[in-house]
Image (spheres, helix red, strand yellow):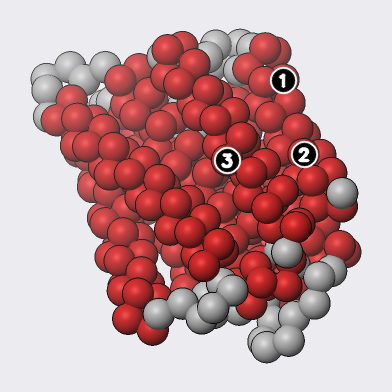
Amino acid sequence: MARYLRNPLTAVWALLTLITFLAFWVGAGGEGQQVDLAVTALVLAIAILKSRLVFRHFMEVRHAPAWLRWSCDGWLVSFGVMVLALYAL
Amino acid sequence: MAADSGVVPTGRAGRVPGEGSMWFFVLGDFWIFSCYFACYVHDRAQSPESYLAGQQLLSQGTGVLNTIILLTSSLFVALGVQAARASDIDVARRFVTLGGACGILFMLIKAWEWSTKIIAGFPAGTEDFFLYYFMFTGLHVLHVCLGLLILVLVWRELRKDRPRPMFVETGGTYWHMVDALWIAIFALLYLVR
């Protein structure tokens, strides 16, 4: 099993874990939080990056045909645009 | 066995990883969740202070812990897929078992989180936020339950003499979808301001 852990996927997992802590550091706060577009946009960008890493590496979309790569990226872009547009309206 | 070659096979370029029908379901599910997310963000924008007040009652640390548990389970399942492709079946089964164990741990922590929220009650004005909180996390836990069932089927497949790597890949695709959905839910419920 150890042989499999020495794998690029483990590095992807470490990166995902690291940016999860980054999102926590950016987004978590104590009492008296205010509406904050910059924090929201950054947290959203991190979530989209994380999902893309899961798609491309764990789900192996990076080796997939173009239609599947574009479907996954299209959903990520539409998710980000939709959330920010509705948030800012 | 390919286990001694030192090379772990990855997916072949230009082919769909797993069954196409599973991808149809996965992409459809993402779009359905997008509609739910749109409702949530729209309603949240109408009274952001009350949603922030509810959000502050959540434990972001618990959300981070559960995120890392699901990411770890995804890693195990992805490694299980590679082991199955390499005909390293015992190792594949162990990785799938570890992935499922992380899924169960995720649900136990979620159940504990729900119980603390229900026991503490919901202050006036935070009901709408908690309605969405229970809807999103509840729907997601249903996906985790189905994912665990699929991992059991994958595990059984890996007990056969000649397990089909495609079956393992397809189960993995569903399991990673559960992880990706949680990443979006975690950001929207726990972290956005």
Which residue is depicted at the point 81% across and 70% down?
A35
Which residue is depicted at the point 26% across and 56% down?
B104
Which residue lies under the disc numbered 1?
A: A70
Q: Are marks 1 and 2 on the same chain?
A: yes
Mark closest to the chain's N terminus, 1 or 2 = 1
Residue B127 at what x, y percent from top left?
52, 67
Which residue type carries mark 3?
Answer: Tyr
- Label 3, label 2: how far apart the Cα atoms are: 11 Å
Which residue type carries mark 1?
Answer: Trp
Q: Are marks 1 and 3 on the same chain?
A: no
Q: Chain of mark 1?
A: A
Label pair 1/2, CB-CB below 8 angstroms: no
Which residue is depicted at the point 55% across and 24% down?
B27
- Label 1, label 2: how far apart the Cα atoms are: 17 Å
Nearer mark to the viewer, of 1 and 3: 3
Which residue lies under the disc numbered 2?
A: A82
Residue B36 is marked as 3
Q: From where the camera sits, is residue B183 visible?
A: yes
- Left of B23 or right of it: where is B150? left
- Left of B133 or right of it: where is B142? left
- Asked whether B21 or B7 is in front, the reply is B21
Label pair 1/3, CB-CB below 8 angstroms: no
- Label 1, label 3: how far apart the Cα atoms are: 22 Å
The correct choice, above or below, for A79 with respect to A35 in the image is: above
Label pair 3/2, CB-CB below 8 angstroms: no
